[in-house]
Image (spheres, grey):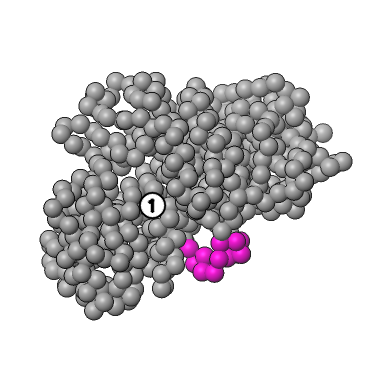
């Protein structure tokens, strides 16, 4: 007879591995099953930059988490602090007037302990100097409350979690999708797979959202979303969500919401794990705050400098998806070229360049050139040049008198050579999910829980609504993954 495990975890991303490690810590036997082959294991987690948002008071909270606490830059680094009140205010900023949700409260309160726990599992961190700090007066100044990423980014996180799983005695099976849940007397007692049933005392669904499923995107997010490029794995098809909902789980959170960012218009349909892991996210184009974005009608359509890009990048992909043809152009001049992230110099980055602004617009296929010229001339004339430009703070250097302002970091686009990057919207992950109880158990409509069924990660609804402070998804995965792992172990009679 096949071995029965205490806990089966479906998926092998960060949330799944956090659940598996927590269950192992409580003495449960754990089998992780992953739909992808070994090459695409780790799901979206392996695509990430590994950035994690959490509450900290200062350097003393960060240094113990670092892979290299002797980094010579540390004495010249101002990490600042990131308080629970700031995290709360950042999340509320995207709630469209909703109060802080129960899930958001849990995310804030458990963010720091969850990071320390993950570090104790062998996952180490490094400061995100290149993307979250600017050098000012000889010091590295972090500007967005997001300071650490896992060593070697998401790929390093997935590798470290897999090593921890193996060390702790967990098993993993690749090319093994869960295709259904086995239910006996109302309780979940295993999963169906193409190779036959697998039985367990508890099942944790950690198999991502529905971002890679074009039909579900159209159904829940809206018309046109079938056209979105998918930034990560093709395997997050909403399987777990469909299985849980079919069993009577309560749909929870904002199903119309998703994390979507500006991406190179030429990017492949899915994120590309064939690229070296450091290059996988290079189709992302999020330095719009240093220039302007124009749509095919030659109009600006967002306040590019509304806030630090950590607080706008996950919404502006959607804004682009809502433009004609789902496209836009990011326009920069030579003054900011050195500030553009390395992804703008990626060998496969698509852009056009010209010595004059008119020459640049002549190169843009599909844009209303006359309208674009007028927009740029009006924009340049509206920049308040009396305020100094400073990308380390919300500098207040804005435009004056435009119906759609640029609120910070506005500079006239007047110094050649000029560059234009064509972009579209790429979906990262979805926000709608199921509701989970205190120990990660999946709740039914009537408020009770489905015995034996747990969920975490992208599958948990109510964490994000109409936007997202960068670096919160992985933290959410650890917070709710750990809860689900402990809950599943307890349901299996362990711990
Ligand atoms: C390009 C990119 C960059 C990102 N950068 C960051 C960042 O820096 N910081 C941050 O906080 N967040 C980031 N995110 C978001 C982050 O990836 C997610 O919030 C997080 O990884 C979700 O973790 P998860 O474990 O829920 O899902 P995933 O990591 O996607 O794992 C889900 C797993 O389930 C598997 N699966 C699906 N269906 C089945 C099935 N039926 N049976 C078995 N297995 C199945 C999938 O193959 C996958 O391996 C980024 C996302 C992308 C795409």
Q: Would residue 447 appear left or right of 297 to someone viewing this image?
A: right
Q: Is residue 97 above or below residue 59?
A: below
Task: Say which residue appears at 42% left-offset and 62% top-offset.
Answer: 319
Q: Residues within 10 Å of mark 1 (few under 14, many from 20)?
A: many
What is the quadrant of the N terminus in the image? top right
Is residue 170 visible to us here? Answer: no
Q: Is residue 252 left or right of residue 346?
A: right
- Percent across and percent down for residue 417 are 14, 62
Q: Quadrant of the C terminus?
A: top right
Q: Residue furthest right?
A: 185
Name the one closer to the observer, 166 or 411.
411
Snapshot quadrant of residue 365: bottom left
**17 above or below 402?**
above
Q: Nearest the camera: 435 or 488?
A: 435
Q: Which residues are magenta?
A: 214-228
The image position of residue 478, as x and y in percent, is 54, 34
Residue 165 x/y as whole percent: 57, 29
Vertical side of 29 occupied by 186: above or below = below
Residue 368 shown in magenta = no
User: In this orientation, which residue lies closer to the viewer: 105 or 48?
Assistant: 105
Position of residue 366 measured from the top left corner of the image (x, y, whole percent)? 32, 76
Q: Can residue 253 be seen at all in this image of the molecule?
A: yes
- Residue at 38% across, 52% down: 312
What secondary structure is marked by label 1? loop
**Which secondary structure type mostly characterizes the magenta part of the structure?**
helix
Report which residue position mark 1 lands on. Answer: 312
Tell which of 1 and 214 is nearer to you. Answer: 214
Q: Is residue 98 left or right of residue 87?
A: right
Q: Residue at x 75, y 28 (%)?
A: 492
Q: In the image, is residue 222 part of the stretch drawn in magenta?
A: yes
């Amino acid at each position: 007879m096949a071995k029965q495990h205490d806990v089966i975890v479906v998926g092998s991303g960060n949330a799944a591995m956090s659940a598996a490690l927590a269950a192992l810590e409580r003495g449960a036997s754990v089998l992780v099953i992953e739909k992808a082959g070994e090459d695409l294991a780790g799901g979206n987690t392996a695509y990430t930059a590994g950035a994690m948002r959490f509450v900290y008071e200062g350097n003393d909270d960060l240094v113990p988490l670092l892979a290299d606490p002797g980094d010579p830059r540390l004495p010249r680094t101002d990490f600042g602090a990131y308080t629970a009140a700031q995290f709360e205010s950042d999340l509320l900023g995207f709630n469209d007037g909703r109060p802080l949700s129960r899930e958001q409260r849990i995310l804030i309160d458990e963010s720091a302990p969850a990071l320390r726990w993950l570090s104790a599992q062998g996952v180490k961190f490094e400061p995100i100097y290149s993307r979250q700090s600017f050098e000012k007066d000889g010091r590295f100044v972090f500007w967005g409350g997001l300071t650490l990423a896992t060593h070697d980014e998401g790929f390093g996180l997935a590798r470290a979690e897999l090593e921890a799983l193996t060390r702790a005695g967990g098993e993993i099976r690749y090319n093994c999708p869960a295709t259904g849940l086995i239910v006996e007397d109302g309780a979940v007692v295993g999963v169906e797979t193409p190779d036959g049933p697998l039985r367990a005392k508890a099942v944790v669904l950690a198999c991502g959202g529905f971002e890679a499923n074009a039909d579900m995107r159209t159904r829940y997010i809206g018309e046109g979303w079938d056209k979105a490029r998918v930034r990560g794995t093709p395997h997050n098809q909403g399987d777990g969500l469909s299985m849980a909902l079919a069993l009577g789980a309560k749909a929870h959170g904002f199903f119309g919401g998703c994390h979507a960012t500006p991406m190179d218009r030429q990017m492949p349909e899915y994120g590309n794990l064939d690229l070296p892991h450091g290059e996988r996210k290079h189709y992302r184009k999020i330095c719009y705050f240093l220039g302007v974005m124009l749509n095919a009608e030659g109009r600006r359509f967002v306040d590019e400098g509304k806030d630090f890009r950590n607080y706008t990048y996950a919404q502006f992909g959607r804004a682009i998806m809502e433009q004609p043809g789902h496209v836009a152009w990011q326009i920069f001049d030579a003054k900011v070229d050195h500030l553009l992230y390395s992804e703008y110099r990626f060998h496969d980055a698509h852009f056009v360049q010209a010595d004059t602004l008119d020459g640049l617009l002549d190169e843009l296929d599909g844009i209303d050139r006359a309208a674009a010229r007028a927009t740029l001339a009006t924009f340049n004339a509206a920049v308040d040049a009396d305020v100094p430009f400073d990308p380390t703070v919300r500098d207040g250097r804005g435009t004056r008198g435009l119906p759609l302002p640029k609120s910070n970091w506005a500079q006239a686009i007047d110094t050649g050579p000029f560059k234009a990057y064509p972009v579209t919207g790429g979906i990262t992950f979805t926000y709608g999910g199921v509701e989970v109880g205190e120990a990660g158990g999946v709740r039914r409509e009537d408020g009770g829980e489905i015995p034996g069924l747990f969920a975490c990660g992208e599958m948990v609804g109510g964490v994000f609504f109409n936007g997202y402070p960068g670096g919160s998804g992985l933290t959410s995965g650890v917070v709710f993954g750990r809860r689900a792992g402990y809950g599943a172990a307890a349901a299996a009679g362990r711990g």
